[in-house]
Image (cartoon, rainbow, N blue to C red):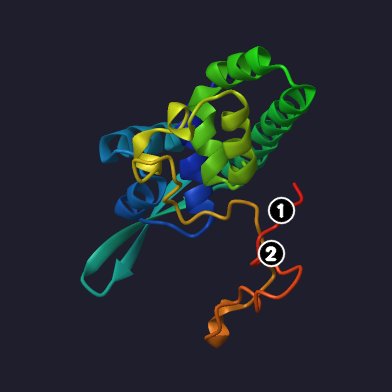
Amino acid sequence: MEQEPNDVMILSAISQGVKKFDKISKKTKIDSQEVQNLLERLEDKGFIIVIEKKGLFGLKKEIVLTDKGRKELEERKFELQQNWNQMIEIWKGGDKQKLQQHMDENRSIIPSMMFLGIMDMMMFSTMMGFMGMTMTSFIPDQYTDGGGHDMGNQDMGHDTGQDFSSGGSGFGDGGPGDMGGFDVNF
């Protein structure tokens, strides 16, 4: 069944604890009217439910995933990961036309891959350079600062394993072999 690419971003945001409509729209960077339409569709499919709770100022609504919604999210993540792996294999094969065709055919899911942290942005940038293109060719403006740089707060697959809460920069001392906390071996 063909799904809206933004469905998975909304399901993922909810799974991460974002339970309010306005916060879902802000986190996913999806227009509020589209978020409303998608939430209604997700509720109709049984992927989410709206719970009313008593709050300090009256009733408040929270959106939560159902078990069916969690299963759908996991399946969609798997599909997106498979698609990303396929892009990598095409890139490694050195066929620029095939890579561009694959990306053109899958343009609508690229923001979902970014949002879910499936896409390695360094590698994606390298792929774009390989094809002689810029990242803005495939990434909608609301996900960049206008220069093709990701502005989201998603994990893009580069875990330095460092705790930044101690006040230090966490980027090493700059000595020999120090790569500044970035994984360069992709």
Which quadrant of the structure image shows residue 127? top right
Q: Is residue 125 left or right of residue 6?
A: right
Q: Amino acid at mark 1?
A: Val
Q: Secondary structure at mark 1?
A: loop
Q: Is residue 89 left or right of residue 139?
A: right
Label placed on residue 129: none
Q: How many marks?
A: 2
Above or below: residue 70 compared with residue 106: below
Q: Is residue 12 left or right of residue 82?
A: left
Residue 156 visible: yes
Sequence-first tag of 1 and 2: 2
Residue underneath mark 2: 179
Nearer to us in this view, 154 or 145: 145
Above or below: residue 80 compared with residue 64: above
Q: Is residue 55 left or right of residue 28?
A: left
Residue in the picture at 45% in, 26% down: 137
Residue in the picture at 63% in, 27% down: 130
Residue in the picture at 76% in, 68% down: 177
The answer to whether the residues at label 1 and label 2 have Cβ atoms under 8 Å apart is: yes
Report, in whole angstroms, how far the alpha carbon at label 1 lies from the one at label 2: 8 Å
Q: Secondary structure at mark 2?
A: loop
Which quadrant of the structure image shows residue 34? top left
Q: Amino acid at mark 2?
A: Met
Residue underneath mark 1: 184
Q: Position of residue 90 (x, y in %)?
A: 73, 23
Please identify the quadrant where the N terminus is shown: top right
Q: Residues within 10 Å of mark 2 (few under 14, many from 20)?
A: few
Q: Residues within 10 Å of mark 1 (few under 14, many from 20)?
A: few
Q: Position of residue 110 (x, y in %)?
A: 53, 32
Residue in the picture at 61% in, 73% down: 171
